[in-house]
Image (cartoon, rainbow, N blue to C red):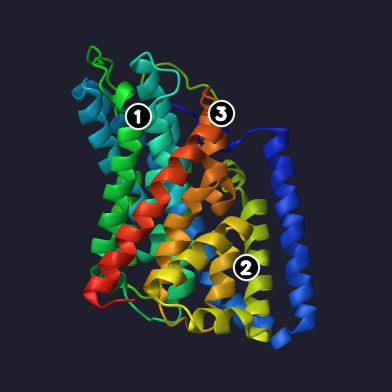
Amino acid sequence: MHDSARTLDTGAPARGLGRAVALLGLVALVAAAIASPADARAAAAQDWSPFVLVTGLLLVGLVAEEDGLFAAGGHTLARLAPNGVVLYAGTIVLVVAVTALLNLDTAVTFLTPVLVYVARSRGERKAPLVYACILLANAGSLFLPGSNLTNLIVLGHLHLSGGQFLRHMAVPACAAVVVTALVVGIGQHRALRATTPPVTEPESATFGVGLAAVAAVTVLVVILQAPALPVVAIGIVAVLARWARPLPDRRGDARTGEPINPVAAVGALGLPVLAGLFGLAVGLGTLGRAWSGPATLLAHCDAWSTAAVAALISVLVNNLPAASLLAAHQPPHPFALLVGLNVGPNLFVTGSLAWVLWLRAARTAGSRPDARRAVVLGLVSAPPALAAAVAVLVASGLR
């Protein structure tokens, strides 16, 4: 099993990107504070909770990965589904479930190496499962508030619990996932038709701290309107508990690499990127409050054009700053806005942080997926997935 800290460490290029994003975010934050302190405080008040929540979810995901839960799921898929179509169906369920419960960034960070392993077990260099991971994670991030930071930024105006949000968005989210899965599956049908001998090598999982933390944060995200602080507390406690009782190697030998510890966990979070995106979000949120342009634009949009505008701006500036800009004031079509912010990033690699994490995780696991191929699949799958989700919203009376 991959060491968690290593899974997220990609060396100098990743550190350079993190520093660049952090510097850009710092400049945006300082500029916002100087230009309009009151609007900057309001934007920060709206944006801090989502970033704290995703930090907690990533910590929980780190412990779950250390316990072998993700790897065991991948091994089980590879063992039970020698048929490519069945394996693909199982991958859809696994990616969407982890995305919904533990955030799309957690899903792409920890499931991508698992799916790389599954591809190798089938003798494939570039498996459709690896490409499907990023596209399904973005499309499947509409189920719960914590599934995507954009949900939480927009949710600040709606004051919905996780259960209420799920009731509103479950069917549109299913529509987006089904359409994305169908388009990717059709585009990769030749690879999916292949049948290979079942994988017999087991991968054991420890059902302890990681599983308990996953269960706890799932309950909190569903029942609470503001779960950020409790979830990050659970993440910290889970990391400390795993550090206090490290796992022996499941093969009986001393583990290579450092086991999880607080320092490794902090390093694995990618804090420079998170901090930079927070600064950009506050900067654009301040702009959205001081300038009426975005609010005026959305006021003249119906549900369909709202989703299209959100998708376009996500690709231009990333969906987290885009959410802060477009939700600086309560949008007239918040659910359509979320569809554009969540599914729209499948159009290009600049759309969400998950794209960067996906490429980093795949390359660290020894795979080099073709970003151009993934973008082509996203360009083909995103428009019909957006249309399907918005059509369900309009038909149900939710906009």
Type of amino acid under label 3: Thr
Vertical order, 348 against 374 (above or below): below
Contact? badges 2 and 3 (CB < 8 Å): no
Question: In the image, is residue 248 above or below residue 159?
Answer: above
Provide the residue designation for mark 1: 188
Q: Amino acid at mark 1?
A: Gln
Residue 208 seen: no
Residue 175: percent from left, percent from top: 27, 56
Return the x and y of residue 340 as percentages of the image width and height.
Answer: 45, 63
Q: Are marks 1 and 2 in contact (CB under 8 Å)?
A: no
Circle 3 SS class: helix
Q: Earlier in the sequence, mark 1 or mark 2?
A: 1
Q: Quadrant of residue 90?
A: top left
Q: Which residue is mark 2?
A: 281
In front: mark 2 or mark 3?
Answer: 2
Whether residue 14 sits left or right of residue 393 in the image: it is: right
- Say the numbered circle drawn on residue 366: none
**Amino acid at the residue labelled 2:** Ala
Q: Which secondary structure lies at badge 2?
A: helix
Which residue lies under the disc numbered 3? 364
Residue at image location 69% in from the left, 47% down from the top: 18
Mark 2–mark 3 distance (CA, rounded to whole Å):
28 Å
